[in-house]
Amino acid sequence: MSNGSSITHFLLLAFADTRELQLLHFWLFLGIYLAALLGNGLIITTIACDHRLHTPMYFFLLNLCVLDLGCISTTVPKSMANSLWDTRAISYSGCAAQVFLLLFFVGAECGLLTIMAYDRYVAICQPLHYGTLLGSRACVHMAAAAWGSAFLNSLLHAANTFSLPLCKGNAVDQFFCEIPQILKLSCSYTYLREVGLIWFSLSLAFGCFIFIVVSYVEIFRAVLRIPSEQGWHKAFSTCIPHLGVVSLFASTGMCAYLKPPSISSPSLELVVTVLYSLVPPAVNPLIYSMRNKELKNALKNLFLVVVFQQQ
């Protein structure tokens, strides 16, 4: 294979060789995928239908749920289909689409989590300016900035990666297409250009992480100055779910891409990849609904409305 244009498809990593394990993989992924669809879909529907949740915090949460659905829908259905039909193939254009969409959704989620930290900072540290700094137009602009910047970043990475000459086969060492695995197939030193872009993107993500940490340092300092225990509880009830989602997002991502090469192995990489690509989208709705009374009450009201309409 002399270049990328001669490759018509890629071969993804198979979870198992036996038919029984392939079916087990299919049913396991199907359960996780349905849980993610149900959890995120319920939150999206509840926020959209309940006018009391039409606030900046829940607007950003709705965007986060859409991104989580996009993330898990980019990789899991194709992996499930491959296991069900006993194949490893993905088309060249399908692989490029996976790379683009996954970068797009993950990048937008990173930006949105940063905006949500800013939202909590303003709500707790500058409550008198909340309506001014986070009006409806400002919220739409910030969300659009997160989506737009992620789109441009993913377009740049995908175009650059799939313009590289590939001459080391077409077997991808992962159950979905991602840039590090595609770069392993390159036979040209021009791949260093993409490595540089990856480090630039990681630097931006690290900057977002630092901003979130600094925001929460200020938030905790402000909360500790609140005299009443009820005020503490109200402030923490809106911050802890977001902090939990950020911790899950950052820890699984760092385990996948920043672990030392000395402890790397194919089986470990597969487990870590499953954790960071499947667990956050499925678990995030549970994290947000556990400690949020407003959201839980809205979910109950939505359930009661649906039940009484069917009777």
Image (cartoon, grey):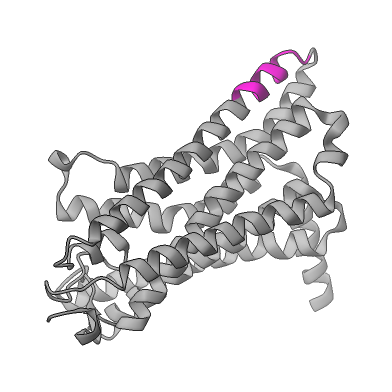
The quadrant in which residue 218 appears is top right
Q: Residue at x 62, y 46 (%)?
A: 288
Could you tell me which quadrant the C terminus lies in?
A: bottom right
Give left or right: position of 83 versus 215: left
- Foreground residue, 224 or 218? 218
Q: Position of residue 147 (x, y in %)?
A: 60, 60
- Foreground residue, 151 or 306? 151
Q: Position of residue 120 (x, y in %)?
A: 70, 35
Q: Residue at x 69, y 62 (%)?
A: 44
Q: Is residue 21 magenta?
A: no
- Foreground residue, 78 or 206? 206
Give left or right: position of 165 versus 92: left
Report the number of discs: 0
Above or below, 230 against 305 in this view is above
- Which stretch did the figure color magenta? 217-226
Could you tell me which quadrant the N terminus lies in?
A: bottom left
Q: Position of residue 243 (x, y in %)?
A: 57, 36
Q: Is residue 224 magenta?
A: yes
Viewer can see residue 177: no
Q: Residue at x 78, y 70 (%)?
A: 307
Give left or right: position of 130 versus 282: right
Q: Position of residue 225 (x, y in %)?
A: 74, 13
Viewer can see residue 20: yes
Main SS of the magenta part reads helix
